[in-house]
């Protein structure tokens, strides 16, 4: 069978760059600045090799390059091309501002050359040796009082720095809608990995107003700058007051355009800045940022900060405003809950939040611990045993219904807002303009949901579009089986399907109403039920509560159910330990397996073997475990024992001390044989912490010492597994009392 993927020719990167520039020139003339127009013109005047060289540099990391790094077979000698690029303003010789990037990209050999040049200029010797690490050499270099630009000019290679990058990023931004300094999507498309062009071939510009485009670009850059600021403040928190005050001055200068997408982005940046100010105890500054952010969750932070500062009257006033005119369900839920708990609005003494109380009051359902880590699957099995049809639906069920029902408006209509061939989600959906743009056809289709022919119409649409790539939902073979009962059995309230208010809310505010839906869909006797599943230790999130309440208001049966793991005293366990060549399951290999099969506290069977990993065992592993290359030279490979191990594990719970590690290695070994591996897991580290809290250490060695468990040959698999059996017995003794 031949690989259908295409081969890329040597000039693919320039073709992609030209494709992007031509697209921007065609669709964005109205918003191109003088600088971006000049960039397009100047690039076209370059000869072909110079264009190729520039795009090669743009597609690499960093902004500083040596001419010796820029040798490409299809381009030829670079010196005359660099001169041409310098004359056009695309590169310049190094300046002091370029030195930080220069140091990052510098090789150790070149750094040593520079140190030798510096030593020749300094009267005192530099106390460094070439054998020292690069960080030590660099630290020594940066402490020297020399003119580094002059020394760099003496090197045999010539260094240049890329210029006009902000202008280029603006062109990228117009195309992608975000600062995206690479063209990997084009490459993936040409290789046949990324699909495009399934929806439309005519596109609408993202912006038609130059000022709005510039603000959007500024907000996109601010997102990246905030990420850099967060890292910087982690290193030096004393800068927070100064840095954030400067940001506040800048934010106040941002125009407040009525366009929903820009308002949303502006609000998000202000909220992020407020959170950062809170983190560094700058509460007054945090409040100022939150006041510039619109709606939830900034409104919640404002209330909580005013409460913390003792401003009770102001806090109560804000809460009342949120209750009277909430921006979303989550905001109302927060305000109602906080008001009741702090101001005793209902006359009751509520100590728990509404979220905590809802979870506390939810019914408990016993599920076999074989479903540890798979709570939804366990509850589905429980209800299937009671005669229900159960689906793990969660968000995808509702997103699929929304996407299929409104497919023409989302993707195919002449006014649908797709802005380039790679987009799969209309921008007006995230920005909140979708409902306003298509209000009439949306309401018509919502009314059709209550009609008998709705199921047939859905099947027709599903068949027509099945498999088309999109960013709303994923296709799977059981989708029709889930969606049809949803249409057929949805409640009818006042002549309207209960589905209508859910889909209407998604159309009006997709970002808030596209997630948080219950995990399970149950059907029985022509009735639907939705269940949010919570395993022990899980919390209910406010947006999940909002979706549950919305479903109940629409007439659906929707609830939370808490799981309680049932501990079968006759449960079969396999307690397993592995020794490995290193710590990464994807690249390292197992060199020893020790496993003990236990039932009702009795050891039934033992599995133990060394394994030949097919590679040398590192010396530090041999020192730790006592296992060396000679010991595994004639040992079986994992492939040799895979079937026997699989049979040994069958029907049991996988137990290990730090189960994620051991389970990950066993799964990786089976994966190399292209065999699936899926077992319920129990981690003795996690459970010892839970049932025996307060110990100084939960390492296997320390626990064995604490509970007087024999461990004579630590870091040999069978010995460690045997000791872990004793921990399992301690854990089960506690669990069976609950």
Image (tube, rainbow, N blue to C red):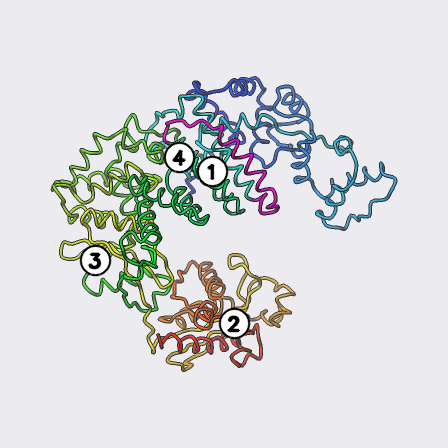
Residue 288 shows which numbered tag?
Answer: 1
Residue range highlighted in magenta: 231-260
Q: Which residue is mark 2?
A: 695
Q: Is residue 513 visible?
A: no
Residue 552: where, in percent of width, then height?
21, 50
Query: Could you say which is closer to the camera, residue 139 or residue 650?
Result: 139
Mark 2 vs mark 3: give the one in front.
Answer: 2
Q: Which residue is mark 3?
A: 389
- The single residue placed furthest to the right in the displayed view is 123
| The C terminus, quarter of image | bottom left
Mark 2 to mark 3: distance in Å?
45 Å
Magenta region, main secondary structure: helix
Q: Residue at x 55, y 70 (%)?
A: 696
Compared with residue 424, is residue 575 higher up or lower down, i.e. above or below?
below
Other-residue count near label 1 (Cα within 10 Å), few / some / many at <14 / 14–19 / ≥20: some
Q: Is residue 319 left or right of residue 588?
A: left
Compared with residue 585, is residue 198 higher up or lower down, i.e. above or below?
above
Mark 2 vs mark 1: give the one in front.
Answer: 1
Q: Is residue 69 left or right of residue 355?
A: right
Q: Is residue 232 left or right of residue 647?
A: right
Mark 4 vs mark 1: give the one in front.
Answer: 1
Classify mark 2: helix, strand or loop: loop
Q: Which residue is mark 4?
A: 264
Residue 625: where, in percent of width, then height?
60, 71
Closer to the N terminus: mark 2 or mark 1? 1
């Amino acid at each position: 069978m031949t690989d259908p993927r295409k081969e890329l020719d040597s000039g693919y990167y320039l073709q992609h760059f030209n494709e992007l520039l031509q697209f921007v020139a065609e669709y964005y003339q109205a918003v191109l600045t003088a600088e971006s127009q000049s960039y397009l013109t100047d690039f076209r005047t370059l000869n072909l090799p110079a264009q190729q060289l520039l795009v090669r540099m743009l597609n690499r990391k960093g902004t500083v390059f040596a001419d010796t790094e820029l040798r490409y077979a299809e381009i030829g000698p670079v010196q005359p091309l660099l001169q041409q690029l310098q004359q056009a303003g695309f590169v310049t010789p190094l300046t002091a501002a370029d030195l930080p990037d220069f140091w990052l990209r510098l090789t150790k050999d070149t750094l040593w050359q520079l140190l030798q040049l510096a030593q020749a200029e300094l009267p005192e010797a530099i106390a460094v040796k070439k054998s020292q690490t690069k960080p030590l050499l660099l630290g020594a270099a940066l402490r020297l009082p020399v003119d580094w630009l002059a020394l760099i000019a003496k090197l045999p290679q010539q260094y240049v720095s890329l210029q006009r990058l902000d202008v280029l990023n603006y062109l990228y931004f117009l195309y992608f809608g975000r600062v995206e300094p690479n063209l990997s999507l084009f490459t993936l498309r040409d290789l046949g990995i990324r699909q495009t062009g399934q929806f439309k071939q005519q596109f609408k510009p993202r912006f038609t107003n130059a000022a709005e485009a510039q603000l959007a670009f500024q907000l996109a850059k601010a997102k990246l700058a905030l990420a850099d600021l967060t890292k910087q403040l982690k290193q030096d928190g004393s800068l927070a007051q100064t840095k954030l005050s400067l940001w506040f001055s800048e934010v106040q200068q941002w125009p407040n355009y009525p366009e929903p997408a820009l308002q949303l982005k502006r609000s998000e940046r202000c909220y992020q800045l407020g959170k950062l100010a809170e983190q560094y105890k700058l509460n007054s500054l945090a409040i100022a940022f939150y006041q510039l952010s619109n709606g939830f969750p900034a409104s919640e932070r404002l209330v909580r900060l005013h409460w913390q500062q003792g401003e009770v009257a102001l806090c109560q006033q804000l809460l009342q405003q949120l209750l009277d005119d909430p921006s979303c369900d989550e905001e109302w839920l927060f305000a109602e809950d906080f008001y009741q708990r702090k101001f005793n609005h209902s006359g009751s003494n509520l100590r728990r939040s509404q979220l905590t109380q809802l979870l506390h009051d939810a019914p408990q359902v016993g599920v076999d611990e074989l479903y540890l880590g798979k709570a939804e699957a366990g509850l589905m099995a429980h209800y299937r045993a009671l005669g229900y049809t159960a689906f793990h639906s969660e968000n995808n069920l509702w997103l699929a219904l929304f996407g299929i029902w409104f497919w023409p408006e989302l993707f195919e209509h002449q006014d649908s807002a797709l802005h380039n061939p790679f987009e799969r989600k209309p921008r007006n959906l995230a920005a909140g303009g979708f409902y306003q743009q298509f209000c009439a056809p949306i309401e018509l289709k919502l009314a059709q949901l209550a009609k008998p022919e709705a199921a047939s119409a859905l099947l027709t649409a599903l068949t027509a579009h099945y498999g088309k790539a999109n960013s709303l939902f994923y296709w799977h073979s059981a989708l029709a089986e889930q969606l049809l009962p949803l249409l057929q059995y949805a409640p009818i309230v006042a002549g309207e399907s209960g589905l209508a208010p859910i889909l209407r809310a998604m159309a009006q505010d997709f970002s808030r109403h596209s997630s948080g839906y219950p995990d399970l869909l149950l059907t029985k006797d022509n009735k639907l039920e939705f269940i949010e599943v919570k395993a022990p230790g899980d919390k209910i999130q406010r947006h999940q509560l909002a979706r549950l309440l919305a479903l109940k208001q629409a007439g659906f049966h929707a609830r939370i159910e808490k799981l309680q793991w049932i501990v079968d005293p006759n449960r079969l366990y396999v307690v397993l330990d592995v020794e490995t060549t290193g710590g990464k399951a994807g690249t390292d290999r197992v060199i020893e397996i020790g496993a003990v099969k236990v039932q009702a506290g009795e050891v039934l069977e033992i599995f133990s073997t060394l394994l030949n990993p097919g590679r040398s065992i590192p010396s530090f592993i041999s020192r730790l475990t006592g296992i060396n290359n000679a010991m595994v030279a004639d040992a079986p490979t994992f492939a040799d024992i895979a079937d026997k191990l699989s049979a040994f594990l069958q029907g049991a719970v996988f137990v290990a001390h730090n189960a994620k590690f051991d389970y990950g290695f066993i799964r990786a070994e089976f994966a190399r044989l292209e065999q699936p591996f899926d077992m319920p897991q129990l981690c003795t580290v996690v459970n010892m912490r839970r049932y025996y809290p307060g110990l100084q250490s939960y390492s296997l060695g320390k626990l064995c010492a604490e509970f007087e468990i024999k461990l004579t040959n630590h870091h040999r698999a069978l010995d460690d597994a045997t000791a872990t059996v004793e921990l399992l017995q301690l854990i089960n003794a506690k669990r069976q009392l609950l």
